[in-house]
Image (tube, rainbow, N blue to C red):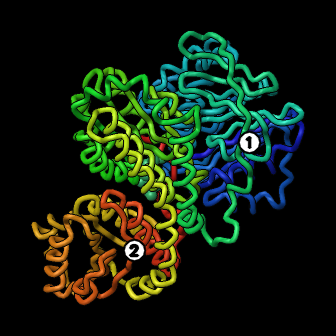
Amino acid sequence: MCGIAAYIGQKNAYPIIIEALKRLEYRGYDSAGIVLYDGKNTKIYKEAGAISCLEKSMDQKNPIGKIGIGHTRWATHGVANTINAHPHHSQNKRLTLVHNGTVLNHHLLRESLLADDFHFYGETDSEILVNFLANQQAKENLSLLDTILQHSLKLEGRSVFVVHDLEDPNKIIACNLGGDLFIGKGKDKQILACSDKNALAGYVDQVTSLAPGTLAIIDADCQIFDLNSKLKLKPEWKKLKLNAESLEKGAYPHFMLKEIFEQEEAISKTIEHLSKSSNYKLEKMLEPYRRTITRLRKITIIACGTSWHAGLVAKHFFNELADLPVYCEYASEFMPTDVGAGDLVIAISQSGSTADTLQAVQSAKDIGAVIISICNVEGSAITNLADVSLLTKAGPEIGVASTKAFTTQLTALFLIASQCGEWRGYLSPNRKKSLWKELKNIPLKINEVLRNNPKIAELAKKYQSANNFLYLGRGTGFPIAMEGALKLKEVSYIHAEGLSAGEMKHGSIALIDKNMPSLFIATEDEHYDKIINNLLEIKARNGKIIAITDSLDTQIKKEADDVIVIPSCSPLLYPFLTVIPLQLFAYHVALLRGTNIDKPRNLAKSVTVE
Ligand code: M6R
């Protein structure tokens, strides 16, 4: 939610910042802006709409300056117009700020600023924030650094802000109150700081992440301070490994399609990373908690959206492989009584910066739970919070709709569950070995499923005009039904509901008529016969049926209107295969409906507000 890019160096900042913002656009795309310092003055340029609108508006201008800060917005406070777009300047025009996140106590700050004769041009909490800093700075005659060190902890909520001070103009200050900011160093003392490490690729060679609770002076020296102790910290610089090509669509028309097709490779890389590589080997990472794991009576999973669906699938993994019950909670509904000291919490997040997840994980940590994070972004806020940080190797996921992140999360969860099962004496080492072997074959089977792409594109044509869909499954098919429905909703804007097929007859069946298609996950597992019954119940009410199955049974082919056949595998591994046709179906329906597939309306990839 909102992307920040700040540059300081010897080159003209505008083209660098605009390119970085384009890479960050998935984080918010309702308005954008840039401030540039040209050696004398700061100049702010902003536009409502996508970054291309800002870029177009700059055509006739001559944006110059070697220091600059850019922002792409996902509106929280105030509509998406030019006035509310960032950067925001203080009333005295001394400070200019961009902000990602929310200031929860902005009402109180606004009132005290009004009492001090401040006026506001827009509706954002970010404008309050810049004036709050300017007011403290003026009242106490402080440098910007001291103002932030002394007053930033009065700001409630999670946010990251980056500020420029016209009276100390050769640096920028970035403050992290609970989000992500990566700072990169390149040739000729160039510094680029961005909300996502991927946006730095091609410009810098070393990177450090600005941890929550710290600030950085962004200049050639790049000093970092702890906001609590006010002490200087030593940044840990690492080589930036990404290359800029991994951020391009290549021959694909959309990132979503590219990322669906990248799943084979992403799963293989995740298995390789967690099961072979010596430093990150799962067993090694979990070893310090082996005793805890052997004694566990339950696991709590915390996540949102697609990551939450991965958690629901993992319930089955832990149940069957480790004899462990799992409570999978929406991060935003997490209650402190959900965990106790010494409990194990698995936090799942592609981005590692989802505010709801971070908040819930922080509460669980405060209670004394052990936190394992499964995350796709090294150095993100969640990896900093976790006791054990396991990384998925999906590579940059740029389409807002999560696809390869989901299947790599399943991969990590399957590996963890079977490792726990072995340590708990529930799974023999040989059984674990053979399960891991089967998991390694999954990418090949995904390849087979992907060959259905042309057929799924045809099905999308047939069903694209329906206004409502039901997605139905049992067992692991139930969370996959929810995930399929979420995919369709977010990219095609068609209403869809994912339900337990068994639960459907307890109410939702009233919706069925000839205009309401149902997608069934009907794999040959213990639920198969019951699923067929549920399918017949829908058929008896004239509902149209699309079935995803590995069954050779002729009945399903006879009863369903359309069938997508997938290869067979161990029942626990079905989710890896059944989700693929649902991702493709959502993609093709969206394509036919002409939506903005990679950046669907109202959404953002990283939801950094609660
Ligand atoms: O980065 P996270 O995994 O924490 O994000 C959580 C959800 O916002 C995310 O999974 C969302 O539901 C997907 N983009 C939907 O495709």
Q: Nearer the viewer, mark 1 or mark 2?
A: 2
Q: Position of residue 192 (x, y in %)?
A: 75, 37
Residue plotted at (86% across, 31% down): 189
Which image quarter is the C terminus in?
top left
Residue 396, labelled with which disc?
A: none
Q: Position of residue 469 (x, y in %)?
A: 30, 75
Mark closer to the chain start, 1 or 2: 1
Asked whether residue 93 is in view, the answer is: no
Q: Position of residue 474 (x, y in %)?
A: 22, 63
Which sits in the foreground, 33 or 326? 326
Q: Quadrant of residue 61?
A: bottom right
Q: Quadrant of residue 57?
A: bottom right
Q: Is residue 71 above or below residue 383?
A: below
Q: Which residue is mark 1?
A: 35
Relative placement, left or right, of 153 versus 416 is: right
Asked whether residue 599 is in view, the answer is: yes
Q: Is residue 106 above or below residue 226?
A: below
Residue plotted at (43% across, 82% down): 460
Q: Which residue is mark 2?
A: 566
Residue plotted at (74% across, 52% down): 244
Callout 2 amino acid: Ile
Residue extending farthest front: 430
- For mark 1, give the secondary structure: strand
Residue plotted at (54% across, 22% down): 213
Which sits in the foreground, 32 or 601? 601
Label 1, label 2: how many angstroms apart (C-alpha)? 52 Å
Residue extending farthest left: 506
Relative placement, left or right, of 313 versus 98 is: left
Label 1 Cα neighbours within 10 Å, binned few <14 / some 14-19 / many ≥20: many
Callout 1 amino acid: Val
Which sits in the foreground, 302 or 410? 410
